[in-house]
Amino acid sequence: AAGTWWFFVLVAIASYTANLAAFLSQSVPDQQIKSLTDLAAQTDVPYGTYKKYKIVTFFQGSSEEPFKTIGKYLTKNADQVLSKTSRQAMDTAIQGDYIFISPTTYEYEILKERCDMVILTSEYFFKYQVALPFPLESPHVSEVNIALMKMAEDGEMDVLENRWFNKDKNHCKSDSAQSKNVLGMDNFGGLFYFLTMGMAVAALVFFIEWIWFMFRRPVDEPVEAFSETGKNKANNNTGV
């Protein structure tokens, strides 16, 4: 049992040392592109979007920087960077070496399902107008407006936004050990099995020894003790 325990301790210490060395030797990637200005200033990574998005017209017709530079780039490289569908642009970005300029359509997928992708910038520079159409003079317009205002006052809008567009990708942290070649708790399963097996063997040996000591036959008294008792009796008889 003692040998099993010390073996467990040695392996645990060695694994901790290896994990610490792997963690300290990791190279943290430096995200160079953090805004549209950084995106327009670089030419190493291609970027584009879905060709029928209104944002393409916005870039191409803008006279302000960095929108003007991005618009020129999209016009010059339209065949390579403007996709036929938005899903095609997203798949190209998933494969790597491509930056997809997308509305919030794919933001939920990136935040909740794609641990291998990041959102480069959180600034919203182009907003789509969204409306809920109703028939003319519909009695439901005021009811919907009141319901929306009540949800905003009660904080339900914030709850929904935090639920669907929470930018903290905490679910991806559980996979960080595997992605960074660092040992996780799953890798120590065999070690704990070995420790449990050693403890079970030690408990079995202890139980067998306890049974043996409890039910073994009693041993006769030593001969020396009997002889000494007989000698004392003889001396007493002589003295009388």
Image: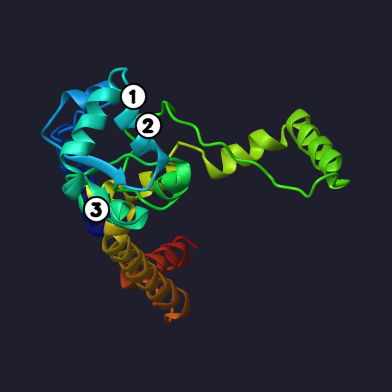
Q: Nearer the viewer, residue 2 or 84?
A: 84
Q: CA distance from mark 2 to mark 3?
A: 22 Å
Q: Quadrant of residue 119?
A: top left
Name the amino acid, label 2: Phe
Residue 214: % across, % down: 47, 74
The numbered mark at residue 92 is 3
Q: Specify whether 159 is left or right of 116.
A: right
Q: Residues within 10 Å of mark 1 (few under 14, many from 20)?
A: some
Task: Identify the residue position indicated by label 1 in the image.
Answer: 62
In this view, the residue farthest toward the top is 64
Three-letter code, disc 1: Ser
Q: Seen in the image, is 140 located left or right of residue 2?
A: right
The image shows residue 166, relative to residue 121, as above or below, that is below
Assess whether mark 1 and mark 2 are in contact (beta carbons under 8 angstroms). Answer: yes
- Residue 125 in percent (x, y) is at 42, 26
> For residue 43, what is the image quadrant?
top left
Can you say which quadrant of the picture contains the N terminus?
bottom left
